[in-house]
Image (cartoon, grey):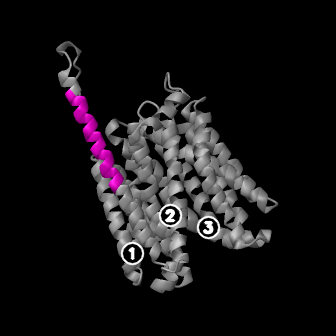
Amino acid sequence: MPLALLALAIGAFGIGTTEFVIMGLLPEVAGDYGVSIPTAGYLVTGYALGVMFGAPLMTVIGTKVSRKRMLMLLMGLFIAGNLLSALAPAFAVMLIGRVIASLAHGAFFGIGSVVAADLVAPDKKAGAIAMMFTGLTVANVVGVPLGTLVGQSAGWRVTFVIVAALGVVGLAGIARLVPDMPKPEGVRLRHELAAFKNVQVLLAMAMTVLGFGGVFAAITYIAPMMTHIAGFADGSVTWLLVLFGLGMVGGNLVGGKFADRALMPMLYVSLGALAVVLALFTLTAHNKLLSALTIALIGALGFATVPPLQKRVLDQAHGAPTLASAVNIGAFNLGNALSAWLGGLVISAGFGYTAPNWVGAVLAGGALVLAFISAGLERRADATSTVVTRSAPADQRTTVHH
């Protein structure tokens, strides 16, 4: 794999760390600013909304410059947002810093996916995308726990300074290692927008929302589920999340490897298994060992869908994939927000802390249904194309590859 992928992975590591580390530092931030924990929670919500809206906005702006330059500008924005968060004199200023940092998130992964795929041979594209996303998954295993520990011992501002420093390393790596890829000739914003007329692109994004939403329906409420149902101590939640992160790392790499060989079968297996494991979590959550194993499996199966879904979008938006790729990153965050809300509804309705697992199973099952629909439509389109080609005059026929 090219060294340029390492630079992209470092940037992804920094972004993944800043996205999730705030969850472990909310009490410290709330205490410093004299606000309630729910109010401090706006730092999480604001970031997620910034990713959803920032992904298409920053990608549209990026159509004016080369992809390498846009990646560098996004890392600069990320550094500025985290420094502002670290130095913020008031809560509102920190919230602004979080939103600024979030604007880089979706576009970085969207444009980075395109760049990563262009760096390697056609049969290694999903693996290259997975390599970049490894930075995000490793952040959940290393960056988030260490960032939380540093924030709790040395102050949360130090954590955000360190994250900004990671951004500087990522920026330097991109400047030095990523080749200067010119903008594709003839591709304009209208071509990027035209990708959204392709039903296959929309189906892939819907699979992203439902599939990864299934993961976060369970993981959002993992703390009360594990402490109240499984009987873990409060301090055990940190290492349970590390298990989840380790599962993400493994699933991401496996998903990338097999998506290059058989993309749709990889989605069938991962989404189907995810739906089953989430449903079983309502039972295994009552046992410490089984619940720990299930959490790791959810991380693995959930992130095994990421490289194939991202590559699916790139393939279907061929020729102008950048905006669609970035919007698909926003779709992950939309899935997170939707599933967290639905999980909260079933808990509030009195169904218990394991009820979000059923929500997740239904969402993942819905994604699997969409995968079969997508494949069916593709087979039908291929069959139609073959019939048209065979019926054309001999001098007008072209070779159709399937």
State how far apart marks 2 and 3 are (Cα): 17 Å
Magenta highlight on residue 383 = yes
Q: Is residue 166 left or right of residue 35?
A: left
The magenta stretch is 369-387
Q: Is residue 383 left or right of residue 65?
A: left
In this view, the mark in front (2 or 3) = 2
> Which of the 4 image quadrants contains residue 20?
bottom right
Mark with earlier residue (3, 1): 3
Neighbour tally class for label 1: few under 14, some 14-19, many 20 plus, Cα within 10 Å: many
Q: Main secondary structure of the magenta part?
A: helix
Mark with earlier residue (1, 2): 1
State how far apart marks 1 and 2 are (Cα): 16 Å
> Which of the 4 image quadrants contains residue 376?
top left
Q: Which residue is mark 3?
A: 23
Q: Is residue 377 left or right of residue 184?
A: left
Considering depth in this image, is 123 or 30 the residue closer to the camera?
Answer: 30
Magenta highlight on residue 325 = no
Mark number for residue 281? 1
Q: Position of residue 237 (x, y in %)?
A: 52, 77
Q: Position of residue 38 (x, y in %)?
A: 68, 70
Whether residue 61 is situated above or below residue 335 in the rendered picture: above
Quick one: SS at disc 1?
A: helix
Q: Which residue is mark 2?
A: 339
Whether residue 336 is situated above or below residue 59 in the rendered picture: below
In this view, the mark in front (3 or 1) = 1
Q: Position of residue 53 (x, y in %)?
A: 61, 47
